[in-house]
Image (cartoon, rainbow, N blue to C red):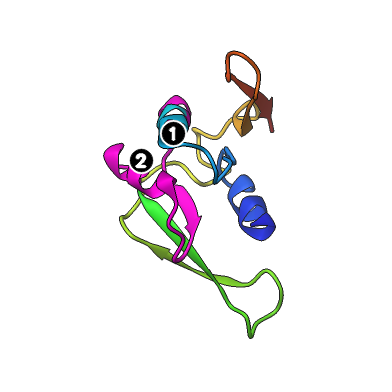
Amino acid sequence: MAVAFLAVASVATSAPLNPLYSAREFDFYLADVPAKALIVLHGSDALARAVARTHKIPIIELSPMPDAAAGCFRSCVQTAPSPGCHDRHHPCWRNDDVALVLHTSGTTSRPKTRCR
């Protein structure tokens, strides 16, 4: 999880979610971001998958490679993510882009954001 998080955070906004959330919570958080893809462990029966499908969010599965070095995994994209701006040299990339979204456990559950 840590390697995947760092890899994603180096090129896109990351919003880590608790895999034990309810379907209602996933629905809120995935819509609130709004998510461009959901990354889950291959073979996991996460509620997030079903919620992501209702929002038409692509699902990316990660499979650990036990015979490889720590942190190595394979990825499988179930549906292709929408094309976007992933290049730091692209004109849409700005220094004030949000790098991390952390939803609070407070009364509003509104995210805290951190710029790059």
Quadrant holding the C terminus: top right
Q: Magenta segment: does it hold 36?
A: yes
Left or right, residue 60 beside residue 55: right
Which residue lies at the image location 58% right of the left edge and 78% below the top edge?
Answer: 65
Whether residue 82 is visible: no
Per the rendered image, the range of residues in magenta is: 29-57
In this orientation, which residue lies closer to the viewer: 47 or 114? 47
Residue 23 spot, x, y in % from top left: 41, 36
Which residue lies at the image location 49% right of the left edge and 32% below the top edge?
Answer: 92
Q: Earlier in the sequence, mark 1 or mark 2?
A: 1
Residues packed near mark 1 inside 10 Å, few (<14), some (14 to 19) or many (20 plus): many
- Residue under label 2, please give it: 51
Say what secondary structure mark 2 lies in.
helix
- Residue under label 1, please give it: 30
Which residue lies at the image location 52% right of the left edge and 38% below the top edge?
Answer: 21
Residue 5 spot, x, y in % from top left: 63, 51
Residue 62 spot, x, y in % from top left: 50, 64
Q: Residue furthest bottom?
A: 67
Mark 1 touches mark 2? (CB < 8 Å): yes
Residue 77: quarter of image: bottom left
State which mark lies toward you, 1 or 2. Answer: 2
Residue 64 spot, x, y in % from top left: 57, 72
Which residue lies at the image location 59% right of the left edge and 29% below the top edge?
Answer: 97
Say what secondary structure mark 1 lies in.
helix
Q: Residue furthest top?
A: 107
The residues tagged by marks 1 and 2 sit, at their Cα atoms, a distance apart of 8 Å
Q: Amino acid at mark 2?
A: Val
Q: Amino acid at mark 1?
A: Leu
Quadrant holding the N terminus: bottom right
Residue 85: quarter of image: top left
Q: Which mark is residue 103?
A: none
Whether residue 95 is visible: yes
